[in-house]
Amino acid sequence: MAQSKRAAWCRRLGPLLGVVALMVLGLLFLLLPDDRARVHFHPSSFNWSAVPQNYPVTSIAPLPTGRPLPMPRVQYEFPLGPRDQVARARQRKVRDVFRRCWKSYKRYAWGSDELTPVNAGWETAYGGWGATLVDALDTLWIMDLRDEFYDAAAFAARLDWAATRSGTDEGGGIDVFETTIRYLGGLLAAYDLSGEKALLRKASELGEMLYAAFDTPNRMPAAQLIFTAAINGTQRASALATASSATSLSLEFTRLAQLTGNAKFFDAVDRVALFLQATQNHTRLPGLWPRSIDFLNGNVTVDNAFTLGADCDSLYEYFPKMHVLLGGLDTKYERLYRTAMDAAKKYLFFRPMVPDDSGGKGVLFAGDAAVGPLQGSLGALFTNADSAADDEIQHLPHGQHLACFSGGMLGLGGKIFGIEDHVAMGDRVARGCAWAYASFPTGIMPESFVMTSCDKMDAPCPWNESRWESAFVNSDGWSSPIPRGFSAVDDPRYLLRPEAIESVFLLYRMTGKKDLQDLAWDMFQSIIRATETAYANSAIANVTVTGETVKTDVMESFWLAETLKYFYLIFSSPWLISLDDFVFNTEGHPFRRPK
Ligand SMILES: *[C@@H]1O[C@H](CO)[C@@H](O)[C@H](O)[C@H]1NC(C)=O
Ligand SMILES: *[C@@H]1O[C@H](CO)[C@@H](O)[C@H](O)[C@H]1NC(C)=O
Ligand SMILES: *[C@@H]1O[C@H](CO)[C@@H](O)[C@H](O)[C@H]1NC(C)=O
Ligand SMILES: *[C@@H]1O[C@H](CO)[C@@H](O)[C@H](O)[C@H]1NC(C)=O
Ligand SMILES: *[C@@H]1O[C@H](CO)[C@@H](O)[C@H](O)[C@H]1NC(C)=O
Ligand SMILES: *[C@@H]1O[C@H](CO)[C@@H](O)[C@H](O)[C@H]1NC(C)=O
C-alpha cells in the first residue's frame, strides 16, 4: 500500500520535476544572452538624445527599403585551397609588428589618443578618448587577438564622450569628421564583427552627440562641434571648410541608422548628398568639387583648386561605397560617381613620363587641377600658375600619398557599376603608388611630389632625359639628385599612411594578381626598416635620405587601424573580410553589407 502510494506520488512528481526543470532551463536560456555579452556598457555623463534640436527637421528621409539589388561580385574568384607558405609567413610578420606596437601602446599610452613612439609617452590628438584604442578594435579582432580585443572593448564601452576639453570654446571644438571616421567607424565595425551590443550602444551615444553638429539653420554640419554653441542655437555650418569634412560622414551615419533603426542619422547625411547633387555641375570645374566649400552659404565657387588628395579624398571615395552599403537602392550615388570620375579622368588623372615604362600600359597618378590663376604653395610649384587666364584649366601633375586611395575607389566603382575601364585604371593607379615607393632610397613614397606628365594616358610615352631635366623644380623639400620621373618633392615626409597599401590590397582582392602581394611585401619591409623605433613605429621627416631616417615621434591611430590591417589582409585568406561581405570606411573599418 505504502509502496504504491509512494509510486503514485512519484508518478505525479515525475512530470512536476520535468516542468520545473524546463522552467529552470528556460530561465537560464533567457539569462544566457546577457551572460554571453562579455562587454558591459556604461553611459556617458551627458545625454545628448535628451537635448532638443534648435533647428529641427520637418521630415525624415527613410532608409531605402526593399531587397538589396543583386550586385556584381567585387572579389576575384580565388581558387579554393590553402594559402602558400610565403603568404602565411608574411602575414605572421605583419601581426608581430602590430603586437609590438600594441604592447607599447598598452604599456605607455593606454587610453590616450596616441603613443609617441620615440620617447614612449602619449599624446592627445582627437578628443582624448583613446583614438588608437578604438581605431584598433577591429584589427585586434581580425588578427585573432581576442583577449586584447575584449580588454580594449571593455574600456571603449565605458568612454564618457562629455569628458573632453575639445568640445569647449577653448578646446576649439570636436573635429566632426575625424571623430566620425575614427571613433564612430571604429565602434560600428567592432560591433559588426563581434556582435557585442555594448559597442553599438556606445556608438549610438556618440552618434547622438555628433548629430548635434547637424543642428544648424541649413542642416549642413559644422566642421567643429562646440557643445555650448550646439545647445544654445548659435551653431552654424562652416563658411570655409575642406570639401570632405561635411561630405564624408555618410557611410558611418548610414550604418548607424541601419543598426539602430533610427532613420534620423541617414536623413542627416542624405541632405548633404542632395547638396552635392545640386552643386556638382556648378563648380568652376563641373563634375568635381574644390578643396574648400562654403557650407554656410552653399557656395562651391570659393576655391578654384581641385584634387582627389588632401581635403577632398573621401568625398569621392564614399560614392561607390554608399551605393554598396545601401544595397544599390539609392540611385544618387552612381550618378555622382560617374559624373565625378568622367571629370577626374579628363582633368586629374595623368600618366607620368617614367624611364622604365617600355611600351607597357603605364602607371597612373591622380593629380590636381586649377581653373584660373593659382596662388599659394601649390601654385608656387608650377611656372606661371599664378598668371593663368581666368577660365584656363591648368593640369597639375602633383602626386599625393593621400590620393593613392583612388586606385581602390576606381576598382570598386568599376566592379559594381560594370565599368571595366575603371578597374584597369585602378590597377594602374595602385601600381603607380607601389612604383613610387620603390623609386626612393628608403623605398617609401613621399607625402607629395611633382612629376612630368605625358600627353595621353593610353599612348606610348618614351623617356626623354632632357625634358625631365628641364622640368626640375627647386622646391624646399629637395636639393640633391631626384629620382627619374619626379621633378620636385614638396613634402618629403612619410606619416605611416595607409592609402598606397590600401589600393594595392583592394586591387589584389579584385583582380587576383599575385604580383601585387610581392609589391606589398617590398613596401612593408621598406616601411618597417625606415620607421621602427625602440617601442613601435614612427612617422619620418624625409623619405629621400640614403642614411638613417629622422623619426618625428608620431604614430597616428591609422597605423594600427588601417596600414597594418591592409598589410595583414593582403596575406590572409581572401575570404577573411571579403569585399563581397564588407565595405571599408575611410579609416579602414569594415561595415557589413546588406544581404
Ligand atoms: C537619454 O534621453 C533619452 C530621451 O530623453 C531617454 O530616452 C534615454 O533613456 C536617456 N538615456 C539615459 C542613459 O539616460
Ligand atoms: C552660445 O555659445 C557660444 C559658444 O560657447 C558662445 O560664444 C555664445 O556667447 C553663446 N551665446 C548665447 C546667446 O548664449
Ligand atoms: C551633371 O552633368 C553631367 C554631364 O553633363 C550629367 O551626366 C549629370 O547628369 C549632371 N548631374 C546633375 C545632377 O544634373
Ligand atoms: C561665392 O563666392 C565667390 C568667391 O568669394 C563669390 O565671388 C561669389 O559671388 C559667391 N557666390 C555666391 C552665389 O554667393
Ligand atoms: C625631349 O625634350 C626636349 C625638351 O623638352 C625637346 O626639345 C625634345 O624635342 C624632346 N625629344 C624628343 C625625341 O621628343
Ligand atoms: C630631405 O632629404 C634630401 C636628401 O638628403 C635633402 O636634399 C632635403 O633638403 C631634405 N628635405 C627636408 C625638408 O628635410
Image (spheres, rainbow, N blue to C red):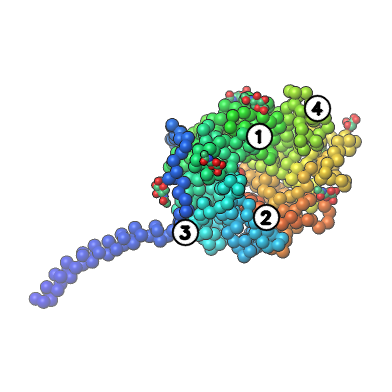
Relative horizontal placement of residue 462, taking residue 16 as reference (left or right): right
Circle 3 is placed at which residue position?
A: 39
Label 1 is placed on what type of residue? Ser
Circle 4 is placed at which residue position?
A: 387
Residue 30: x and y in percent read 34, 58
Q: Indicate the secondary structure of the residue bearing disc 2.
A: loop
Relative horizontal placement of residue 489, taking residue 2 as reference (left or right): right
Q: Quadrant of the N terminus?
A: bottom left
Give how far apart the Cα atoms at labels 4 and 2 are: 40 Å
Label 3 is placed on what type of residue? Val
Q: Residue at x 82, y 52 (%)?
A: 545
Crowding around mark 2 (Cα neighbors within 10 Å: few <14, some 14 to 19, many 20+) is many
- Residue 220, relative to residue 130: is it above or below? above
Task: Verify CB contact (< 8 Å) between mark 4 and mark 2.
Answer: no
Q: Is residue 327 visible?
A: no
User: Which of label 3 and label 4 is nearer to you?
Assistant: 4
Give how far apart the Cα atoms at labels 3 and 1 are: 41 Å
Residue 399: numbered disc: none
Q: Indicate the secondary structure of the residue bearing disc 3.
A: loop
Residue 503: x and y in percent read 66, 44
Circle 1 is placed at which residue position?
A: 292
Q: Residue at x 36, y 60 (%)?
A: 31
Of residues 459 and 397, which is closer to you in this image?
Answer: 397
Give how far apart the Cα atoms at labels 4 and 1 are: 21 Å
Mark 4 or mark 2: name the one nearer the start of the chain: 4
Where on the picture, by quarter, is residue 110?
bottom right
Circle 2 is placed at which residue position?
A: 555
Label 4 is placed on what type of residue? Ser
